[in-house]
Amino acid sequence: MILSGRGVTAVLGPTNTGKTHYAIERMIAHDSGVIGLPLRLLAREVYTRLVEKVGHHNVALITGEEKIAPHRARYSVCTVEAMPRETTASFVAIDEVQLAGDLERGHIFTDRILHLRGRGEMLLLGAATMRPILEYLLPGITVVERPRMSQLLYAGSKKITRLPNRSAIVAFSADEVYAIAELIRRQRGGAAVVLGALSPRTRNAQVALYQEGDVDYLVATDAIGMGLNLDVDHVAFAQDRKFDGYQYRNLNPAELAQVAGRAGRHVRDGTFGVTGRVDPFDEDLVHRIESHEFDPVRVLQWRSKALDFSSLKALRKSLEAAPAVSGLARALPAVDQQALEHLTRYPEIVDVATASERVEKLWEACALPDYRRITPAQHADLISTIYADLVRHGTVNEDFMAEQVRRADHTDGEIDTLSARIAQIRTWTYVSNRPGWLADPTHWQEKTREIEDRLSDALHERLTKRFVDRRTSVLMKRLRENAMLEAEISVNGDVFVEGHHVGQLAGFRFTLAAGSEGTDAKAVQGAAHKALALEFEARAARLHAAGNGDLALSSDGLVRWLGDPVARLTASDHVMRPRVILLADEQLQANAREHVLARIERFVNHHISTVLKPLDDISRAEDLEGLAKGLAFQIVENLGVLFRRDVAEEVKSLDQESRASIRRYGVRFGAYHIFLPALLKPAPAELITLLWALKNDGLDKPGYGELIPMLAAGRTSVVTDPSFERTFYKLAGFRFLGKRAVRIDILERLADLIRPLLQWKPGTSPRPDGAYDGRRFVATTSMLSILGATPDDMEEILKGLGYRADAVTAEEAAAFLASQNGETAPAEEAGASVADAGSVEAEAADAPTAETEATGTAAAEAPAAPAAETEAADTAAAETQAAPAGDDAAAPAEPEAPAEAKPVLLWRPGTRQDNQRQGGRQGEQRRGGQRHGQTEGREGGRRQAPHGKSQGKSQGKPWEGKPQEGKGSEGRPGGQRKDRGDRHDRNKSSPPKFEGRPPRKEKPIDPDSPFAKLAALKEQMKK
């Protein structure tokens, strides 16, 4: 051993004292030199700095995995493991000599410290804790202590998301490093990652990402404590325990100071602290780190250099030799010694390693680093394979190596996969750089280096993609440079700042993209708004000049310009004049804002007046006076539909001239409704529903917008949904009638079919299909067809309209009609006729519902079919009734159980007595044993009691009843007496009798009435 420190200088001190820089300056002052560094990454950094000073042809780089050796290079930069055992160089330096106390690598540093010397100068660089042990082991050594150039201060505990910019967060496991980096990416834009397991090229790229300002945070292990020059202002410990290769333990104060010392650069002060789940440091620890006062290193790790290769047993014994000098401690078995222990148990190795040369070759193979971090046994297996090739063939089998290299040559996969492949290829890079191990080392050195570089670049890309928000990093870098951020807006509204997508402009509103909530959010918004200010003005000008075709009003109450929402409607005092609320950011100001609002208001008013022209016209009518004007006002307030019963008195009081004036605006006086037929179309109905919803806060009510598609599909009636807001049926042009809703104009067509049946006088011919006794009628196929309903639905609809049914048997109905038609037809024919009418219900009830719906749809698609076609359809339907209802009823399905004949329902207008009579039968069940719930008889909250079968049988006798007091005939549905155009009121002074009609009050005929025109046409035909 060389136990003299003569010619050796130890430059000791904390971090940021310029020790490495001093060593580089001293080395280039000599004609040759060698410097050993603890990390391949740091060796690369020093190599680059030397090349800048003396040129690449004068500098060699030698590590276990890389060798750059220009011919006659004067200076060599090495990792400590790759330093030569002997050298003729004038200058030798070893950095971070305090690692001589490390349990895993310490014996290598100790060996170089004690044995390697330069001809002219020897420098040992490290922490001040090494001074006592160096002065003891190397008497005569010169020690120079250098003070820290800046102060290191404790900043306490902070949350990770509140750490200042230019911070390094330190953890001691890859999982923890990745988790912290992910959190910082989400909260602060991104972080660079540095781990010892990364390849040097990847670590260099990640450090450059941080150094160049693309990110403001670095998440790393304690690898950053080994001399890396970083612009770190604050170091935060997210963990204070690590696994040192043998056990988990707390870091000692000197180790904490080594990492914390990375904070600050040159004369700029730095801070350190804790974050995450780490408890704040106690005062004594803080004081020791800030003042750099630590326990000295008392022993160095040592392993014998004098190895005996005569046999495996001798080699193992020499490795276990104890040091002869105090201050040195025998090192624990390192990776190479552990591999040797495993290999000596392999019989094939014991059989081969008999000569000293082969034992030495085995020890050389055991030096293969375990880059893959696998188990010692697996690592020993790989060494065994390589050693077998070296002994048998002199070189490693290239086919075997080619296969191993090929498996690693893939750049797909995620971070962990790429890291494993890099560890694999580094193993073969080391093999290719061992002298004499390969037949063509140059080829494999180039190939493995190329693959490692590609994998390292791919890993850097994955790390950056996962842990760095490129948009944020670029913006923050430009902001630090105080540069004006450039913003632009694409045609489809995407907003870009410095070429990165930051948000979307829809109409006159800007929305930040997801992930823009970090510290740069205000800067991004500021840059975007500068560009948006001009864009808003340009858009305002284009909107002001836009045609109505570029604007649209959607069912959600939004006004859209070229698809983008620019305003929304809200309620005002007038239902047809909603208020316009502009959807625009503050950047739309002054005149531009006013012009946009005015243009949208003009569009909305024009759209409403166009789509709802009949309603708009009548709302502006100036020629209406008195009761007509009041009725028109109610039509507008009710958005085009009035129930006639609600305005019966007003209608009765109108004279013919007033009626004609209202009809000129498209108003129709129907049997059940006063309405505007032009509004019973999808577009007007949708707009009417929207206006009502705005006025009544109904956009979120159930059923909004659900009925318009049914209207557009031509449905004449629909099954009602009890969860829907009932008003929506009326707004869509449907009358709610219990379980079914029927289109209003279709109900008026139904009234046109019922009216002649109730006006027919017994004894006259021909008797209309469905007429019975002038007061009652039977549902016909024509009625079912136009309604698209089944007989059961028809029963619900007629009851909802206020009709009541008397149930008689088919034989009774036939007998009655036979007595009425005795003069014109035999009784058998009359009975068959009524049986045919009654069997409509029975046979239609057996028909599939789909056919009924199809019939309703067809009726909707051709509402104006000629009467002749309707009659032909009715005739064809009647002809299909092959047998009279009475015969069907008499035919038993089983001889033992004859089927009960279905009664014939005779419908008549309901009266007050019916309502009172039904009120006492709330608990009764409907025909067939099923209870029937209340049926909607009148809109606006009035409901009819459930109606069952008539208790008695009419026996063909006329029904007598009193009209409802205080109600005109036009307030009653179905068989109300009306004149042509509008029937005269029933004479209230004379109770109605079955034998004849009550006297009618003559009124002047309205010349504009369609009935008047029909009468005139008949008179012309008579002439």
Image (cartoon, rainbow, N blue to C red):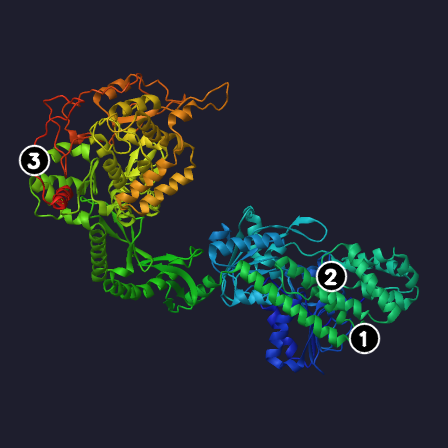
Q: CA distance from mark 3 to mark 1?
A: 124 Å
Q: Which residue is mark 3?
A: 1003
Instruction: Please report contact status of discs 1 and 2: CB closer than 8 Å, yes or no.
Output: no
Say what amino acid the circle numbered 3 marks. Lys
Q: Position of residue 893 (x, y in %)?
A: 48, 24
Q: CA distance from mark 2 to mark 3?
A: 136 Å
Instruction: Report x, y in % for residue 551.
Output: 28, 58
User: Closest to the observer: 865 or 122?
Assistant: 865
The three-letter amino acid code for the residue at tag 1 is Ala
Q: Amino acid at mark 2?
A: Tyr
Viewer-closest of 326 and 334? 334
* Residue 883 vertical position relative to residue 601 in the rendered view, above or below: above
Residue highlighted by disc 1: 439
Helix, strand or loop at mark 3: loop
Of mark 3 and mark 1, the one earlier in the sequence is 1
Asked where in the image residue 839 lies, by quadrant, the reply is top left
Q: Which quadrant is the C terminus positioned in?
A: top left
User: Which quarter of the figure is the N terminus placed in?
Assistant: bottom right
The answer to whether any part of residue 81 appears in the image is no
Query: Could you tell which of marks 2 and 3 lies nearer the N-terminus?
Result: 2
User: Which label is found at residue 136?
Assistant: 2
